Amino acid sequence: MIVSETAEKIKNMEIRGAGRIARAAAEALRDHALALKTPTYDAFRQRMENAADILIATRPTAVSLPNAVHIVMNGIGEASTVDEARRGIVERAGQFTQSSQHAVEKIAQFGARHIRDGDTILTHCNSEVALGCIIEAHRSGKHIEVFATEVRPRNQGHITIKTLSDAGIKTNFIVDSAVRSFINDVDLVIVGADAVTVNGAVVNKIGTSQVAHTAAEARVNVLVAAETYKFAPRTVIGELIQIEERPGSEVLPDEIARTLPHVTVRNPAFDVTPAEFIDLIITEQGAIPPQMAWIIIREYLGWDITEFQ
Ligand code: RUB
């Protein structure tokens, strides 16, 4: 797929979910590198960097996106010919896609071990890795039941219940505001992540922090399923994760909003759950307490503080 097409699909959420966005960006860079017909290395590099910038600018919150782009683009500066630079990009994009898929499978295996026979699990939004854990537990023969939220305003919960139903898992579909009414029926909350900051806070779909607070009050454990490339290196040097605010028309149709001149519709797409409300983050390298986020950034993202100085 060409870069502008992928960028548009990420922007309009045809491609969504932090892991899928990251893999789509890596694949778009690979395809772009293969299609580019530039005679000079400098022109090739310039056009690849422009493509990388276009992809990164599509959605600001999921750190998996700039991390994936960084992984694929890293090393282009060391090449000296177009062929060499192209080969490197194709190779790194392939490696990233493969390791991302492998991470999703590994997390499913690790996460499933935290689910006991007879458990009821609550999930919010549509996370490939969180659902992977739930489906793996079901496949391994555990009798489980799920509560899945609707996820206003974009209804990602509809995708979640279709996946769970297709897997044959008994599922209850609830509106977002019903979480507190059912939390005492729940044994475990499992959600995904768009970003994990150096202090172990998790950025995920709007409403996740309410779910986590509710779970904490009810003494229900909260697990976050997140590949290591969702950890945010730049939070080490004080950068904040930007929370995407999407058009108000996703919440309230424009024709109604127009009749309400004193009303402003606010539509943040994500929120931040502090580390204290999270029991474990399950990565493909194993489970960690959220307070150990820095170790993941240092050990597995190969991130070096001098890079940003
Ligand atoms: C998706 C969302 C998901 C994470 C993790 O938001 O918040 O929980 O991205 O997903 P949106 P995954 O629908 O706005 O992209 O585990 O699939 O990477």
Image (cartoon, rainbow, N blue to C red):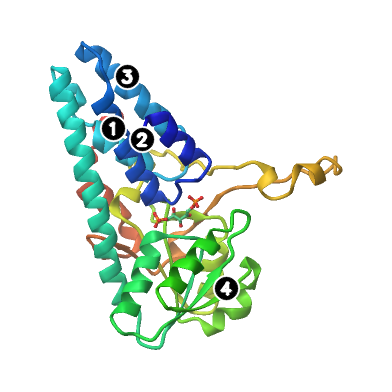
N-terminal-most mark, 1 or 2: 2
Residue 173: % across, % down: 57, 73
Q: Quadrant of the C terminus?
A: top left
Determine whether label 1 and label 2 are within 8 Å by CB. yes
Mark 4 residue type: Phe
Q: CA distance from mark 1 to mark 2?
A: 7 Å
Q: Earlier in the sequence, mark 2 or mark 3?
A: 2
Q: Residue 47 — which label?
A: 3
**Foreground label between 1 and 3:** 1
Rendered-image quadrant of the N terminus:
top left
Give the secondary structure at mark 2. loop
* Some atom of ligand 1 lies within 8 Å of the CB belonging to the residue at label 3: no
Of badges 1 and 4, the one in the foreground is: 1
**Residue 157 as seen in the image, left or right of residue 114:** right
Residue located 44% across and 67% down the image: 163
Instruction: Report, in whole angstroms, how far the alpha carbon at label 3 lies from the one at label 4.
Output: 46 Å
Residue tagged by mark 4? Answer: 173
Specify whether residue 196 is in view.
no
* SS of the residue under disc 1: helix
Determine whether label 1 and label 3 are within 8 Å by CB: no
Residue on which the image places disc 1: 31
Q: Which residue is mark 2?
A: 1
Please provide percent x and percent y for residue 102: 22, 57
In the foreground, 165 or 179: 165
